[in-house]
Amino acid sequence: MPFFQFAVEYIFGIFSDWMVLVMVICGLWSLFMVSRGLAGRKLRREADYAFYGGWFYLGLGLAAFIGGRLYNFFF
């Protein structure tokens, strides 16, 4: 159990609150601004990459935020 606790604390030490905030902002920017701009230039494939990449960053940031809060709540 100590190794698991060390690993989880190390991972959530990397995902600090500021990093999570930057990831969420980048995800929203890519989702709403970049994908629409690329779609307006008729770059459909790149717009799809930006759209799904935005959801990836947004989901990863929110999962890190919720995971860190749950870990701090239970441990």
Image (spheres, grey):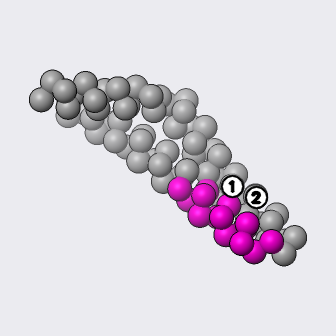
Highlighted magenta segment, given as a residue range: 43-56
Circle 2 Cα neighbour tier, 10 Å, few/some/many (<14 / 14–19 / ≥20): some
> What amino acid type should be assigned to the residue bearing mark 2?
Val
At a point 20% along the width and 31% down the height, the residue shown is 4
Quarter location, residue 53: bottom right
Q: Is residue 29 above or below residue 45?
A: above
Q: Is residue 20 magenta?
A: no
Say which residue appears at 61% left-offset and 51% top-offset. Answer: 27
Q: Secondary structure at mark 1?
A: helix
- Res 34 label: 2
Q: Position of residue 67 (x, y in %)?
A: 34, 41
- Determine the main secondary structure of the stretch shown in magenta: helix
Is mark 1 in CB contact (under 8 Å) with mark 2?
yes
Residue type beneath disc 1: Ser
Instruction: Give the residue number, with chain letter if any, for mark 1.
Output: 30
Task: Using the image, determine if residue 26 lies above or below residue 13.
Answer: below
Q: Is residue 72 visible?
A: no
Q: Position of residue 51 (x, y in %)?
A: 64, 64
